[in-house]
Amino acid sequence: MRAKELRSRRRRRVPNPGARAHRPVGWPVMRTSSLTGARIAVAAAFFAQGFVFISLTTRLPRFLERWGLDEVTLSLLLLMMVLLAGVGSLVAERAARRFGSAGTLRLGLALMVVAVPALTLAPAIGFFVGGVAVYGVALGLVDATTNMQAVDLEHRYGRPILPSSHGYWTTGGISAAVVVLATGHLSPAVGAFVVLVPLVVAFAPFLPHVAPTPVLAPGVPTSGVAAGPTTTPGDAAAQAGALVPWRPIWLVGAGLVVFYMVDTTAATWGPVYLARSFDAPGNLVALATFPYLVTSIVVRLAGGHLVTRFGVATVLRVGAVLACGALALVALAPTWQLAVAGFTVLGAAVALVAPLSFSAAGRIAAGTAGTAEAQAQADRARTDAVIARFNQFNYVGALLGAVLTGLVGADNLRLGFALPAVLVLALVPLAPAFARGTLSRR
């Protein structure tokens, strides 16, 4: 009797109730093959972003030496880059309405193809500064659109995939750190070859993924989805500010600020710290970044399981306390080997903050986005707009990490690492905000 009932359900295509339990109401379903292709494409985009970013930050000591820059000048350059990344993120919000987040992602990757050779092969300081500026805009475009795509996929899957998606960013960073460790003794011009990665991802015919026309779940009305004088994606995005509960998003955004302050401090100033405070061998300064990324990816790949077992708030609170201790070890380390140990623990401690931030923001936005009658395309545009705005918290944190660390630690970088050691504890009271509407794993 049971087998007969199952066969009958298949013929009638009755959906599995659990498959929609964690998907925003009215959100479209994608076929398994489409989901797989989309996830591969998003993974490739995250990988390219991480590969380029870590390739450049681990070469900062060489750039400082080549152009005779000090910590204050570097802080001002990073300030420019962060501000332009914020501009890029705002552009991504508007461009995604017209061209879609995938098309805008291609644009950001293409700009990286221009920026990386400009700053690594620059014949004069002006070209170097110009390359940093172009890279800043590209950074904002790619940051915003990769997270738009990943949030959209998470809603389609109906379970957390942001931790593993950000794990591909970390994989790209680890790969870049390995390349720098192997080529650190060579000319900085070798860094120009980094451009091959975003070049392949941007112009490969199947990457990044462009979502097909939505296929609504059975029982969801389709009127107004394909045609007719209905709400457009741009209209939905324009209404985001009026309909989204921004207070909980601001709380989660504050956590994202804390994360990027810590992350940028480690990625940007870690190699400089080892080189100047400990006189570590030039080809080993990437060790400030490499173990940080290795422990990050281990935790991110296990992120779904950790969140399911212990809960979002507990995971973030424990991580915040560990991060405080790790940064204190970095700041007080008597040798570069102990500083590297601190960076190693730090990577594991804060690994899940960013993916859980974007996941929470996406849930909050989608939770107000629609009813069963809402247009799936408009709902996605609305969430894209919220994610693009939410991404601005990224650059506030990067500003604190890249600029304030350099300014506070201009005479002694140990002081620069002491600042985030205190501020990271803000994640303890902020942790419950991340758990709003938590997705559970199937």
Image (cartoon, grey):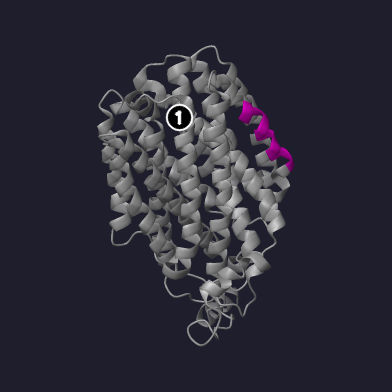
Q: Position of residue 194 (x, y in %)?
A: 30, 40
Say few, some or many: other residues with alpha carbon within 10 Å of mark 1 (under 14 / 14 to 19 / 20 or more). some
- Tag count in the figure? 1
Q: Mark 1 highlights which residue?
A: 73
Q: Which residue is drawn at the image coordinates 38% and 26% (left, top)?
A: 64
Based on the picture, tell me whether residue 394 belongs to the magenta stretch: no
Q: Where does the image place residue 113, in percent across and percent down from the top left? A: 30, 48
Q: Is residue 422 visible?
A: yes
Q: Nearer the viewer, residue 156 or 235?
A: 235
- Seen at 27% across and 38% down, the residue is 192
Amino acid at pointer 1? Thr
Look at the image and give the residue range highlighted in magenta: 419-429
Which residue extends farthest top? Answer: 334
Residue 362, position in %: x, y? Answer: 59, 59
| 72 w.r.t. 137: above or below | above
Residue 422 part of the magenta-drawn span:
yes
Q: Quadrant of residue 365?
A: bottom right
The reply, left or right, for residue 78 in relation to residue 27 is left
Q: Which residue sits at x=58%, y=66%?
A: 19
Looking at the image, is 250 positioned above or below residue 348? below
The reply to whether residue 159 is in sight is no
Main secondary-structure element of the magenta-colored stretch: helix
Taking 209 as reference, is 23 left or right?
right
In which quadrant is the C terminus drawn? bottom right
Q: Secondary structure at mark 1?
A: helix
The residue that appears at 34% across and 22% down in the rendered structure is: 283
Q: Quadrant of the N terminus?
A: bottom right
Extreme residue toward the right, this view: 429
Q: Nearer the viewer, residue 75 or 204?
A: 75
Image coordinates of residue 188 in percent, x first then y, are: 28, 30
Q: Nearer the viewer, residue 99 or 128?
A: 128
User: Which picture quadrant has residue 379?
Assistant: bottom right
